[in-house]
Amino acid sequence: MELFRPVNAEEYRELAERGFREFPPRTFSQPIFTALLSEEGASQIARHLRIAKKSDNRTYVVRFMVDDVYIRQFPVQHAHELTRRALWIPAEDVDILNQHLIGEIRVLASYQIDREDSEVFFA
């Protein structure tokens, strides 16, 4: 199954350190790993995340493939809005998820804010 995820600059760095082959473990404040079923939904969330109170205001959208048999155990949920369908994977299962990834995690888009608080898109 093809899935998408918005990531902040910190998670992007951790993905790069892992060679874009696995997701980093969740922190205590992140009990759920959200994987979206559409690139559009992930991009919408990434554009909203760029406003987060962090020094690095860049966000990314990544695409990854997961073994269908494994991922189908997670029911489809709605993230933030009814139009954003997602799978919610418990934080403690991210290591297992990583074992079922197919290929590399690919970066599809990058967003940042310029000085006038306007969105800039990088493909």
Image (spheres, grey):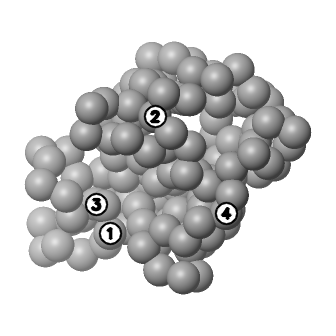
Is residue 62 toward the left or the right of residue 11 in the image?
right
Circle 4: is it few (<14), some (14-19), or many (20+) Cα within 10 Å? some
Pointers 2 and 4 in contact (C-beta within 8 Å): no
Q: Which residue is mark 2?
A: 91
> Is any part of residue 26 visible from this angle?
yes
Pointers 3 and 1 in contact (C-beta within 8 Å): yes
Q: Position of residue 85 (x, y in %)?
A: 62, 69
Q: Amino acid at mark 1?
A: His
Of labels 3 and 2, the one closer to you:
2
Nearest to N terminus: mark 1 or mark 2: 1
Residue 53 occupies quadrant:
bottom left
Nearest to N terminus: mark 2 or mark 4: 4
Q: Position of residue 113 (x, y in %)?
A: 24, 64
Circle 3: is it few (<14), some (14-19), or many (20+) Cα within 10 Å? many
Q: Which residue is mark 1?
A: 48
Q: CA distance from mark 4 to mark 3?
A: 25 Å
Is residue 120 toward the left or the right of residue 87 in the image?
left
> Is any part of residue 120 visible from this angle?
no
Q: CA distance from mark 3 to mark 2?
A: 23 Å
Q: Which residue is mark 3?
A: 50
Q: CA distance from mark 2 to mark 4?
A: 17 Å
Q: CA distance from mark 3 to mark 1?
A: 5 Å
- Residue at image position (55%, 71%) is 78
